[in-house]
Image: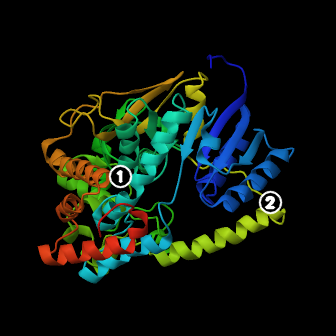
Amino acid sequence: MKPDDQRKENVQIAYIGGGSRGWAWGLMSDLAAEKELAGTVKLYDIHHEAAAQNAVIGNRLSQDADTKGKWRYEAVPALKDALQGADFIIISILPGTFAEMESDVHLPEEYGIYQSVGDTVGPGGLVRALRTIPLYVEIANAIKQHAPDAWVINYTNPMTLCTRTLYEVFPEVKAIGCCHEVFGTQQLLASMVEHKLGIASVDRREIKVNVLGINHFTWLDRASYQGIDLFPLYREFVEEHYADGYEGKKKGHWLNDHFASAQRVKFDLFRKYGMIAAAGDRHLAEFMPGELYLKDPETVQGWKFSLTKVDWRKKNQAELYAKGQRLAAGEEAFVVKPTGEEGIEMIKALLGMGELITNVNMPNRGQIEGFPAAAVVETNAVFGYNHVSPILAGKLTPEVEQLVLPHVTNQEMTLQAAMNKDKALALQAFMNDPLVRLTEEAGAELFDKMLQNTKAMLPGWEL
């Protein structure tokens, strides 16, 4: 590939998890709206029929006269078939089923441990990681064999450990982990600028930030809008809205939206530590000791965010399945609308079609001082033709570093436990998590039960 300003007609994308009824449709929508790109998307999924259905939906969309980006979608039966010839590899998979996720999220509740997401840290995040890492070992080996020069864009959680595994298995991989949580904080700051300074229609991309931390536990030590330092303004904003939270025009939105919040956790962390926590409250709460924000459902309600129940995810999955049937049959029109993700902008920049600066997850190459070199961290990076260059972000304050670094250590421990099928090491990581405030006996009992509920995805473990 050579950089130029011409339309790219033959871009090859491999989509692992191509049967998705969320991320895959989002990718289709963003590709359909992009007039400067065209090519082929090979969809691979362990549920081949789901990928085949998405191929029908994608090709139907491409045939629409109003579709700007024309792509050919092909469902393939094997991972290697998707990877061969790929310029870009997108990974968005569900590691296991909602049955495993139900155990991850809700079994700990029997021991007094509540989780708002359960996919990154906490007991649910750790067990999810143990069954996800072997899948990523397989994916990394396949990339090494069939598409070593392709760029890999990972959206799967736990983001840090998925990306970390790719590099552990294939150190030369060109992989990045992408997350939109920082975007939400930029949007909050944009709303603050509108509200406090009376400026209309501030785009979140106009909010310039310095990002430091790990995925879902990211922090900002600088934020500005057109040369205005936003930290003094944010301090005022936090004091104004701390008691009741801030939801803009959507009052009570957090009660009806499983993913929304009133930003009270974010505001509380700013008051405590003086840095802007740059993820959603549901994620931030899980990195902190359980007695603070996740002590019980009443405490969660007081902080104005939600415990996302797996029953809701099951219901939503059934609704999406029915929608997929209608889209594939032509009984419902595919509505093209922007997802807000930056995957397409990243692809364009890597193809030499401009430059992009955004937050990504990559191994620490000095971009965060005081963090291990092998650990995957989240900072801004510059995207250009065939390169992603992390930006030196500096150092967290000592107080915030003491919150983040134990999680880095625990994630490294979890990786080694998964790679070596080491149950004792995995249990140690499990008990180290700040949400797991149990006796050794109770912790080991819960851990054993959770492993039994996911043992089908732990090949080679002695359970």
Within 10 Å of disc 1 (Cα), the crowding (few <14, some 14-19, many 20+) is: many
Q: Residues within 10 Å of mark 2 (few under 14, many from 20)?
A: few
Secondary element at image label 2 = loop
Residue 342 seen = yes
Instruction: Please provide percent x and percent y for residue 190.
Output: 45, 45
Left or right of 387? Residue 329 is right
Q: Indicate the colouring scheme.
A: rainbow
Q: Is residue 192 left or right of residue 320?
A: left
Seen in the picture, residue 184 relative to 440 is either above or below; the reply is above
Q: Position of residue 416 (x, y in %)?
A: 26, 49
In space, the residues marked 2 and 1 are separated at their CA atoms by: 34 Å
Q: Which residue is mark 1?
A: 216
- What's under tag 2, amino acid-wise? Ala
Q: Which of the 4 image quarters holds residue 429? A: bottom left
**Residue 263 visible from this viewpoint:** no
Left or right, 100 with reference to 325:
left
Mark 2 sits on what residue? 333
